[in-house]
Image: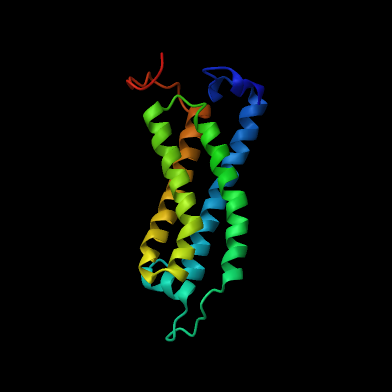
Amino acid sequence: MQSFVRRGFQLRTASLETRIAYSAFLALMVPGVVTLIALSIGRIGLSPHSIANYYRGGEGEMTFPKNFWQLMEVSHFHLFTVPVVALILSHLLYATPASVRARIWLTSMLFSGAIIDATAPWAVRYGAGGFACLLLLGWVLLSAGALLVVAVTLWAMWGPSPLPSGDPLEPE
């Protein structure tokens, strides 16, 4: 971790054992994201209607509304784990040659998805079923953001040497 304190540290120049450890973490992130997607689709569904029914209950499918403590339990777990994973992924992303603009965009995508994923179920349950579209957006942002950060970071460690970015936001 001391390497990260050096300005301009790049994962490509990290020791082999460091790159292996980070790569193993990133490789485990892929099935983590896949299980997020699978649970979302399998337990809840991908349509705004099915999401609203899952949280608000529905007569046609004999589902009951999620109660306060059920939502609190899910929120508790998500609010302690998802931000930590997003922080680690962002931290690794910053040690890649990706442009400042790309790093800001991906970090914003990742954390926006995490915030929406944590708050939208409450909005669906206690606000309106229409917030289900927002929850879908959160899932997309969180999943796509995580997978993109994983891909960029692995590419930066193991792919061919990068070309200069040419990004005007990039410090010299």
Total numbered labels placed on residues in the image: 0
- Residue 105 image point, x, y percent: 39, 37
Picture layout, residue 53 above or below residue 39:
below
- Residue 30 image point, x, y percent: 54, 47
Picture layout, residue 85 above or below residue 23:
below
In the foreground, 55 or 162? 55
**Quadrant position of the C terminus in the picture:** top left
- Residue 170 image point, x, y percent: 38, 20
**What residue is shown at x 49% (from left), y 85% (from top)?**
62
In the foreground, 5 or 21? 5
In the foreground, 47 or 162? 47
**What residue is shown at x 38% (from left), y 64% (from top)?**
131
**What residue is shown at x 61% (from left), y 50% (from top)?**
81
- Residue 117 image point, x, y percent: 48, 56
Which residue in the rendered view is the most extreme toward the front?
127
In the foreground, 54 or 71? 71
**What residue is shown at x 48% (from left), y 51% (from top)?**
115
**Quadrant position of the N terminus in the picture:** top right
Which residue in the rendered view is the most extreme toward the top?
172
Colouring scheme, one of rainbow, by chain, secondary structure, one colour: rainbow
Picture layout, residue 54 above or below residue 88:
below
Left or right? Give the position of 169 relative to 19.
Answer: left
